[in-house]
Image (cartoon, rainbow, N blue to C red):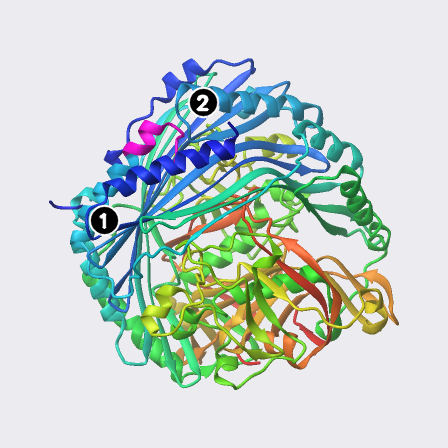
Amino acid sequence: MNTTLALAAEFPEFDIQSALARIGSEADWIGLRYVQETTHRRSVRNGKPEDNSVTFERGVMVEARVDGQLAYAGTSDLSEKGLREATRQAVRLARISAPHKAMTFTDRHRPQAVGRYLSPHRAGLDTQSLGEFTDRLIAASRHLKVADKIVNATAEATLVETRLQYASTNGSDIDEQFLLVACNFGVTAQDGGVTQRRSLNGPVARCRQAGLEFFDFEALYAECERAGVQALELLAADDCPNETLDLVLAPDQMLLQIHESIGHPLELDRILGDERNYAGWSFVRPEDFGRLQYGSHLMNVTFDPTVEGQFASYAFDDCGHAASREHLIKDGLLLRGLGSLESQSRLGLPGVANFRAASWNRAPIDRMANINLEPGSGSLDDIVAAVERGVYMESNISWSIDDYRNKFQFGCEYARLIENGRFTQVLKNPNYRGVTVPFWQSLTRVGGTSEMFGTPYCGKGEPSQIIRVGHASPPCLFTGVEVFGGGL
Amino acid sequence: MSFLSEIRAVFDRLAESAFAELKTGEALNLNLSGEDQTYVRFNDSKVRQATQVRQTTLSLTWQSSGRKVEYSYDLSGQQEWDLATLHSLMARARSEVRVLPEDPYLVPLENHGASDRHHAGRLPVDEEIMATIAGETAGTELTGFFASGPQFRANRNSAGQNHWFSTESAFLDYSLFTINASGENKAVKGLYAARDWNRDEFLAAVEASKNCLPLLRSATRPVAPGEYRVYLAPAAVSDIVGMFSWGAVSYNAWKKGDSALQRLIAGDARFSEQFSLRENFELGLTHRFNTLGELPPADLPIIERGQLKNLLVSSRSAKEYGVESNAADPAGWTGEYLRSAEVLPGELAEADVLQALGTGLYIGNLHYLNWSDVQSARITGMTRYACFWVEDGVPVAPIRDLRFDESLYRIFGSELEALTRESRLIPSVDTYYRRSLGGRKIPGALLQAFRFTL
């Protein structure tokens, strides 16, 4: 028997329109969101199998509107009885919370929407055998281990198949199917008391909507060897200097810089204060839209779920709002926030189609999707050539920012000193810190070629949710940044 | 039949059916987790989102021929479908293990006994709690999160072990906001958690939080980056202790070069004699059995009077490295993490904290911690919520949030002046995927110096 990576065929179909027709209720409006997701985790460590697991999630979130209040009930019991009970619970919660509601809901918060979406891909999970894929991961971990000083070499892949269907009593009928892949190839090198980590662009930064064609193993093997060699270089490297100078960030660190200091502060539910008990508030005020010079004139940032193959692309968000590309920041000026139809009506400001839930058991909230820094011009070499003294950093390893998204400190895996327009020595333990708006206003060069990255692990919300985001960026130059290294 | 007894019967039926299907040389480990929860989030004392979630996840670990595969799925509650899925996954497991390489660190399943614990609770009625929270906190800009209902964890395996743990409890995790004389937002954080929800106790807790607001309304005292004497309240110390679970106390992480305690383990760095950290399941915040059904010691010292006593060792790590297991859980985000941590208290009376601090910073909460240099056990993060400038033992003004970057070896070592006599029991309020169990018991900490950088 040829055991492929595919699994989903073993589970039965769910007819959402039939379910909606049969549940009945006293609510003014009902919506059903069905989520079926199969997540494969395949990992090896030092040539040995570590994790071979598959998680299968399947359930429905019922939304009910009563007296202008929406409430939710999630269930994995997909029988008519189970869905009726969940509907009863959603109606009950809507009714008892209506006297204390934060806003009044109408049909405009749940527009009628009909459409389909399918992730672009060439090779489905049924096109490769599990045995062959595992052998490839084992080979990758061996390519990572370039010397005895590599004490840990991990090669792991996550493969996700998602089916999301949405139907409502005002005629919505959405069916979106996603095929998502992510990978993590990394090493730890150790020599005496010194330890350094290196990976391919940081843990799980490589993630896309794609099929198995994403895994070009022959190319990956070469990259794994390079990561192993760089980890050894880091063992022997000097610490990053403690100094204020020019900073060049590679696209795989720009992903984190964009995520934390643009994506999160622009979420309208944070600006409204929904998140201030947990993830935090924002320094951005409603009156800042259209007025705040967020960064230099080189800063152009878009919300774009329409990019083919990017990790957080989709056709509709989870209230049926059709997705489109929008400029959040143009020539450095803040124009638009990341807010759903609900947040838009509460704030009276334009937003985007970004109402998303982590799975069937969570209500949607405002989420960034693909947030991209649009390219400028020139190559990385051109940028480096413009630097007299600076540091170039790659691949995030540490992240922290305050609850208003102002004071941040980020660390990277790998750095190079730049002197007189050229890369010189390798530096270990590179960190930098700053404050969001002054930092973005110090943006003086934006490269001409973007690279796409993302993360499957953006956390937010009460109850908490982990969601996928995508970020594309070219390399960028910032001037006058405080950088520093390790030590007590 | 109650939800808990119903799901327990379902689990027994599924387990018996699965175990009966096994052939010679095959073994199966089953874990069940789930909840029936009301989740309500509040903004400005109004209901922003109310959600009911009933969910049960069955995880199965299949072993045969020295190989292992794992699956998990959401139970539907429909016996026929759930059984069919289980048997379908078992068939899949048989075919997968044939094509996977042998796992040299596989831990054969054993019978680690049985346990059965249920903590019954008296929970508030949803309608009443919404009215109480909205009514009693109106005008305080309460933003927060209420969760209430039963949770359960269970484990059975084909060697015969059988563990069950369930609990019924509720919490409100909240912040009260105000604007101070400098025009800045300020907040105080509160948490009321109980198995037996008591309306009067709950209102008293909220009232105590409200009493902090007048001080928060004072004009902000600018504090420049630098080193200051600080008092870290238990919630702040708890966040720092949480970093020990980011690989620091994991034996496996140490062997992989990822532990932040490498220097302590090597004897190149030390903690204060005042600092003792242990895993203490007697706190009653979570089940003792791990995902393999093993029972770790009820009380396991990790650091005792500044000296390392134990790292957390799962049976898988034990097999890989040829050491003894202490039944740490190999699962979870990092594996081998603290599930019920306790920092032993000191001698400083909480009532004397401000006087002992003298002039410096009172830090109520921290936020968004991460390693800034793993090798040096250095952590960065932010102050948050009720943080004050204190002069001669008197809190005089709130501060603007500050970023710190500081080493565990200074926080719990060279700079640790005293720990409080009183400790706080801080249950976990995490809700990723499902409501968490566990928590920490933590005293406050007075430090001679703490580094703020931004």
Q: Quadrant of the C terminus of chain B?
A: bottom right
Q: Amino acid at mark 2?
A: Leu
Pick the front one: A244 or A151? A151
Q: Which residues are magenta?
A: B75-84
Q: Which mark is residue A404?
A: none
Is residue A403 toward the left or the right of residue B246 in the image? right
Q: Separation of disc 1 and disc 2 at Cα? A: 36 Å
Same chain check for tags 1 and 2: yes
Q: Main secondary structure of the magenta part?
A: helix
Q: Is residue A187 above or below residue B7?
A: below
Chain at tag 2: A
In the rendered image, which residue does mark 2 sit on? A83
Quadrant in the picture for residue B107: bottom left
Q: Residue B300 colored magenta?
A: no
User: Secondary structure under badge 1?
Assistant: helix
Q: Nearer the viewer, mark 1 or mark 2?
A: 2
> Is residue B40 among the parts visible in the rendering?
yes
Do the CB atoms of the residues marked 1 and 2 lie less than 8 Å apart?
no
In the rendered image, which residue does mark 1 sit on? A212
> Is residue A409 among the parts visible in the rendering?
no
Query: Residue B1 location, x and y as percent?
Result: 51, 27
Is residue A471 toward the left or the right of residue B447 in the image? left
Q: Residue B76 colored magenta?
A: yes
Q: Amino acid at mark 1?
A: Leu
Query: Residue B406 location, x and y as percent?
Result: 62, 73
Query: Residue B257 location, x and y as percent?
Result: 41, 75
Chain at tag 1: A
Pick the front one: A122 or B59? B59
**Which residue appears at 56% of the width and 36% of the height?**
B37
Is residue A282 toward the left or the right of residue A17 in the image? right
Pick the front one: A178 or B346? B346
Mark sitting earlier along the chain (1/2): 2
